[in-house]
Image (cartoon, rainbow, N blue to C red):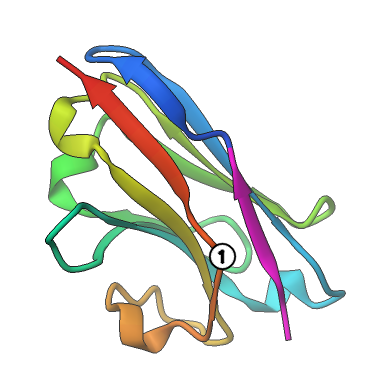
Amino acid sequence: QVQLVESGGGLVQAGGSLRLSCAASGRTFSSYVMAWFRQAPGKEREFVAAVSRSALGTTYTDSVKGRFTISRDNAKNTVSLLMNTLKPEDTAVYYCAATNTVTLFTTPGTYNYWGQGTQVTVSS
């Protein structure tokens, strides 16, 4: 089992940057595929990015490709999301998630563990 705690959200102007972090408990962090999802008011939770257990593989939703970078540090049990060139449509609560599989799934139902979320607001 793993517990996830996000941090790093906030208010930023369009074009700015934020770095989200997710700290995981437990001694088996490296056995989980890690991902970030987001949920805007009135919308369904959507996939943002995922990183493989070894950190060698990543995948992104099309709308953030070239702007966001997901990374992980298995020695520190952390996963990060660096968000550049932020847009107002990136405004959402961002969630860290974990799944004990090999595949970089993009659907929320395939993730077993979730953090409490951190708010990101991008002003125009």
Residue 51 in view of the camera: no
Magenta segment includes 6: yes
Q: Residues within 10 Å of mark 1 (few under 14, many from 20)?
A: many
Residues in magenta?
Answer: 1-7
Q: Residue at x 33, y 87 (%)?
A: 109
Instruction: From the viewer's perspective, tell me whether residue 116 is left or right of residue 74.
Output: left
Instruction: From the viewer's perspective, tell me whether residue 10 is left or right of residue 79.
Output: left
Secondary structure state at the residue bearing disc 1: loop
Q: Please provide percent x and percent y for residue 39.
A: 26, 57
Q: Residue at x 39, y 73 (%)?
A: 104
The residue tagged 1 is: 115
Q: Please provide percent x and percent y for residue 3.
A: 71, 72
Instruction: From the viewer's perspective, tell me whether residue 22 is left or right of residue 120.
Output: right
Query: In the rendered view, would you say 8 is above or below 84?
Result: below
Residue 34 or residue 53, whichever sits in front: 34
Q: Quadrant of the N terminus?
A: bottom right
